[in-house]
Amino acid sequence: MARATGLWAHPDFLKLWTAQTVSSFGARIAREGLPLAAVITLKAGPEAVGVFAACRLGPQVAVGLFAGPLIDRLPRRPVLIAADLARALVLIAIPLAALLHRLTLVEVYVAGALMGVFNVAFDMADHAYLPSLVAPEQVLEGNTKLGTTDALAETGGPAIYGLLFSVLAAPIAVGVTAITYLISALSLATIRARPASAPAEDEAPVRLLDIVAGLRGCLAHPLVRPLLATDFIRSFFGAFYSALYLIYAIDVLKIGVLLLGLAVACGGVGGLIGAGLTPALTRRMGMGPIIVVTGLFTGVVGFLTPLAGGPPLVAFGFLVAAQLLSDASGTVTEISATSLRQASMPPALLGRAAGAFMAGGGLAGILGALIGGLLGHALGVRETLYIAAAGIALAPLIGLFSPLWRTREAGVAA
């Protein structure tokens, strides 16, 4: 029997990977499931779905800023476990409210906001935990494996919620996903290894300087700064999709929940392809150029979504192509950008740097979701999605005119 090598031989990373995999499935199902419950059960329109998206993204601002210093001081594994358990409780509350005939848009908004809080806490702690658990030369491999299972979740999660929502009432289907977070928490609890570099213990209260240190560090770094600016613009226009995609697919294209789930699942297939191609592409082109090129490609193929039309199966084909291609390139961008950021920032600032990206993306997402919902009502859903695709396509040009374009790996220009 062949001997396992690399991170396949790292039992504690495999436990972290397992936890991230099942929680990613839960996150994908809940991400689409909560607004679907609003659209199907409560008949929500574009503005209401935009408000929900803003509620889900809003916590990234406050939590991203204030939790970063705490995560840099606290052991990361307990934070991950607590976030999983909290998300399970939030999702269990949705079917309970429905059974008591008390489920309204307000409850859906609150659930979206709470899920946003705990999603951000989990993602920030996970971002800071990986480099302390594996060797520096294994970080790209670790991010690639985590990106692969994110893509698997993007494939399986939508297919599962499409099936669940076809068989079960929407609120019940949302509650079922709580199981994934419980499994994740259990897997994290079995990790026994002490991190290679534990966060510094500091009992002093979090100060304003601590909160802004991550943002200042990101803005001061010539490679991380364009990543932050690009991420802000992409998050703003990407939130248009958060506000409008479900309504566009169901009400405009008339493809139904099951085909919608399958279309989004095809994006996960693209993500798997992108995760598999990332190491070879970064070696061939360099981290900086591949981030710019794949970011531009993601925006261009995004035009396939508003171009969709005709009979439902034809429109479904356009959505499949858009999901497949954009998620493939987007996964390469995400893995490469995350690895470059982790390698560029000091370990003591990783939590706060992640918080700066979360806060920036959250602020952009709030504005984008609200404006996208209003534009969808005023201009039309399809027209607003054209604007979103154009904005996402233009965002990577920031990297083209920065040192990022000349960077083959962290700290090494071409």
Image (cartoon, grey):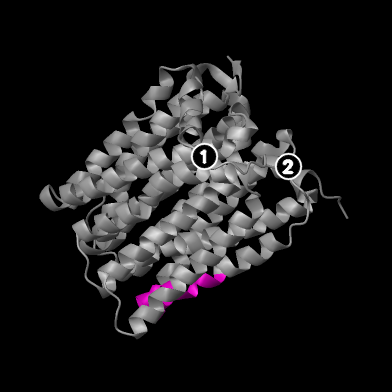
Hey, which residue is sitting farthest right in the picture? 1
Check if mark 2's residue and mark 1's residue have beta carbons within 8 Å: no
Residue 208 placement: quadrant:
top left
Question: Does residue 384 appear in this view?
Answer: yes
Nearest to N terminus: mark 2 or mark 1: 2
At mark 1, the secondary structure is helix
Which quadrant of the figure has residue 188? bottom right
Q: Main secondary structure of the magenta part?
A: helix
What range is drawn magenta here? 164-179
Q: Position of residue 323 (x, y in %)?
A: 40, 49
Question: Where is mark 2, residue-wise?
Answer: 134
Q: In the image, is residue 282 above or below residue 331?
A: above
Categorize mark 2 by other alpha carbons within 10 Å: few (<14), some (14-19), many (20+).
some
Q: Amino acid at mark 2?
A: Val
Per the model, the C-alpha gap separating discs 2 and 1 is: 18 Å
For disc 1, the marked residue is: 354
Q: Is residue 167 magenta?
A: yes
Please tell me whether residue 409 is drawn above or below residue 120 in the rendered image: above
* Quarter of the picture holding the C terminus: top right
Tell me the amino acid under the disc marked 1: Ala
